Image (spheres, coloured by chain):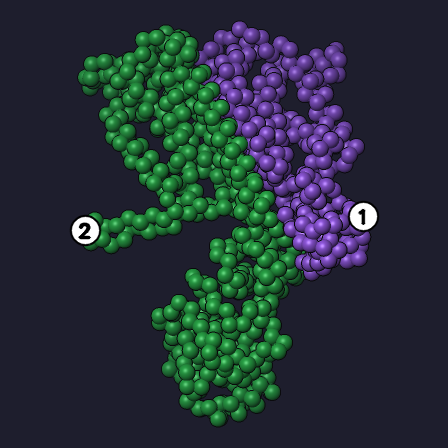
Amino acid sequence: MANCKSVLSMPFQQEYNHRRVAPKRHIFMDGDTQRMIRNLYTRLVLIVIVAALAIWVDLTDQIQIYNPFNDAILVERNVAPRLGLDLQGGLQVLLEADLPAGTSIDAEAMQTARDIVENRTNALGVSENVIQLAGERRIVGEFPGAEDADASLDIIHQTGLVACVDTGDHSPEEGTVLQTDFAAGSADGTPPATTPPPGTEAPATETPAAETPTAEPTEPQTVYHTIMTGEHLRSVNVGLDPSGQPAIDFALSAEGATIFEQHTAANSGKYLAITLDKRVISAPVIKERIPGGQGQISGSFTAETANTVAVQLRYGSLPIPLKVVETRIIGPTLGEDSLQKSLMAGLIGMIIVILFMGIYYRLPGIVAVVAILFYGAIAFAIFKYFHFTLTLPGIAGFLLSTGAALDANILIFERLKEELRGGRNIVQAVDQGWTRAWSSIRDSNLAAIITSGILYWFGSTFGATIVKGFSLTLALGVLISLFTAIYVTRTLLTIVLRNFKPQNLQLWFGI
Amino acid sequence: MIDILSKRYWYFAISLVVIVSGLILLAVGGLPLSIDFTGGSLLEIKFEGETPLANAEIVQLYENAGIDDAQVQTVEGGTLSIRSSFLDNETRDAILNAMKTESGGEVSVIRFDSVGPSIGAAVSSRAALAVGVAALAVVIYITFAFRKVPNAFRYGVCAIIAMIHDVALVFSVAGFGAMFFDWQIDSLFLTALLTVIGFSVQDKVVVFDRIRENSSVLRRLDYETLVNHSIVQTLQRSINTQLMTVEFLLLALALFGGITLQEFAVILLVGLFSGTYSSIFIAAPILVLWEKQEWKNWFRRSGATA
């Protein structure tokens, strides 16, 4: 090992001093060392480009890249930072399937329940609601900045109301909110005649007839007659129409059958809208009188869309009963206070660290600080670009991974100092510092990544998004920090040493 | 060169005293599990009206709503924190409305957490599992990473012993905190604990890595000198990384980071310090002790190390 060391560094030194390499020596060279020298300035350019991109993403909320030839937008993405509930206040609820423990729960039904909850809460007009499955029997809902937590909770609790509405000659588009005369005892929690929030998706905008769903049309002027509600629906299934296309078969209760027969007899050729929570799911034309309470809705359904509509009709109420097992409300003032204070704390900590690195490690320390700032810019840009939610523990995780980034640098610099004290020249010492510190950097950081993975798994099963946020920022931070220590610090330091050859080791390296 | 290892039994004794006293406090005060694990509710409010309610009145309001285990605490700046068993949303609304009426003004909710009992139990068992899996993953990883060193398995085991030391120290700090500052063990505590485990291993790996490297270069040295040599070589890094950088960041977080993060930051501060301490003063000495099989002499010594 000791021999190997000197052999390794000798050609490096030659190349550095005389810029010529004896081909035979190549076999002794560390492949990475060789590549490093050829590509040094390419690396620098790459680093500058990445840094510029990162800073650009950091400073804006919306990025757009145009194609220079035809002005078409190539990339467009909203990169506004997402703050977690603990930083901006809001409501978090954990819903659990209200079934006896041990009952096996159909994953698809859970997914449907999640979709329905999401559709309902979208009507609230709170942007950036997140409804996620958490484990097999839980759904976690987050409503950042929700002013009125009760409204959100009511919406989740409501049972969806399926209704058949007579729209006469008018053919309403899917997703339209219809005003109906059915009001008394309505289970519908949405305030009447409200315009749905922009950007919300109606439950069934994907049904085939809706070729171009316009942005949430509302028709407050007409009040339509509700013929009957979903309580008369006995079964809904996906079947095939006479031409073999997917269609929806439904059966009604005896009472429903009578109402339906009368209505269809009198309104042949008119439209009959089927609504869920007043939103039109499908609006078929009545072809003929339908007796016996058996009917079929046909249209240009695909098997998938037919199934979606059938599920919505069947489970206007949720496919799985859900109960609220956990509620967390964080007032907006607490959130803002935490954000301010932790950002201030992070800033103070960073300033101390920068001072320390500069004073203790001198030249390499300052280069490392540049690399750390670079690291911070990249990490923040990644958080913004991929819409990570920034939480308080997330900030702590980020600070800790900054510590890990510094640790990699410190390991290298201590090695560097050792080699310098051992009498090597600067270039050899830099090279050895990296080569020999690498195994401990790799092994120790892998251990941290393993733990982050386990934390992430723990956080996902319980909707403990704070734990998830922490582990994700920690793991990502450790990975980026590895990259900056190995790639950025090394490149920058080598370039600095090439162009500026310090004579006074004590002054520039602190030994 | 500083001789660190010769005083190893002193380090064991110091750690033991700190840990045992903390654990005694914890045993006396009981494990202060938060509602994250036990289920229950926490309501933090501030009265904006002219006649804020007295604590007893609040307890009375809770009792009227059928909740008879409410405990009220004044936090800071007129904020009240009320703990009780699980509140559903209807009950919470009823209580808040009653508060508004009686205090003659708005009641602002600063924070409300309510965790059902079933979820609390599930979190506890999963948390224990998470810690266990993390420990196992680490032993496997270290044994793998050091597979070329004689007795690779020992390194894994020593890392785990030191990790248990760190975990025990964190718990004993929690014991102190619970006794004197009313801390609670919540999911953030758990996050901190798992982080301590992760970084504890990171520190051990750095020291072990030096032992691994030195044992191939300096074959002639006896094991104790070799390990001591490795510790001293990595000492500067340990101090700089841990004390100067990580601890600075965490200290800033603990001092200025606001009430929500304070406990979290202090736990991490102590835990990460312990992680560095234990790699030098626990893990490496145990390696030597194991190599020399010192337990054969123990019956002649005092029992301070058991």
What chain does mark 1 sit on?
B
x, y (%) of residue B14?
69, 18
Name the quadrant of the C terminus of chain B: top right
Q: Which chain is painted in purple?
A: B
What percent of the width, then of the height, locates residue A104?
61, 60
Residue found at the far front of this picture: B50
Q: Chain of mark 2?
A: A
Tell me where residue A53 appears, x and y as whole percent. Answer: 32, 39
Residue underneath mark 2: A69
Q: Is residue B211 left or right of residue A486?
A: right
Nearer to us in this view, B94 or B130: B94
Q: From the viewer's side, name the closer residue of A216 and B105.
A: B105
Q: Nearer the viewer, mark 1 or mark 2?
A: 1
At label 1, which amino acid type do we have?
Answer: Ala
**Residue B34 in view of the camera:** no
Residue B21 versus residue A355: which sits nearer the camera? A355
User: What residue is rendered at 80% in x and 52% in y?
Assistant: B60
Q: Which residue is mark 1?
A: B56
The quarter of the picture where residue B275 lies is top right
- Of residues B146 and B7, the one drawn nearer to the viewer in this rendering: B7
Q: Name the amino acid type tagged 2.
A: Phe
> Label 2: how many residues lie within 10 Å, few (<14), some (14-19) or many (20+)?
few
Q: Residue at x 57, y 27 (%)?
A: B251
SS state under label 1:
helix
In the picture, which chain is green?
Answer: A
Residue in the picture at 61% in, 63% down: A154
| Badges 1 and 2, same chain | no
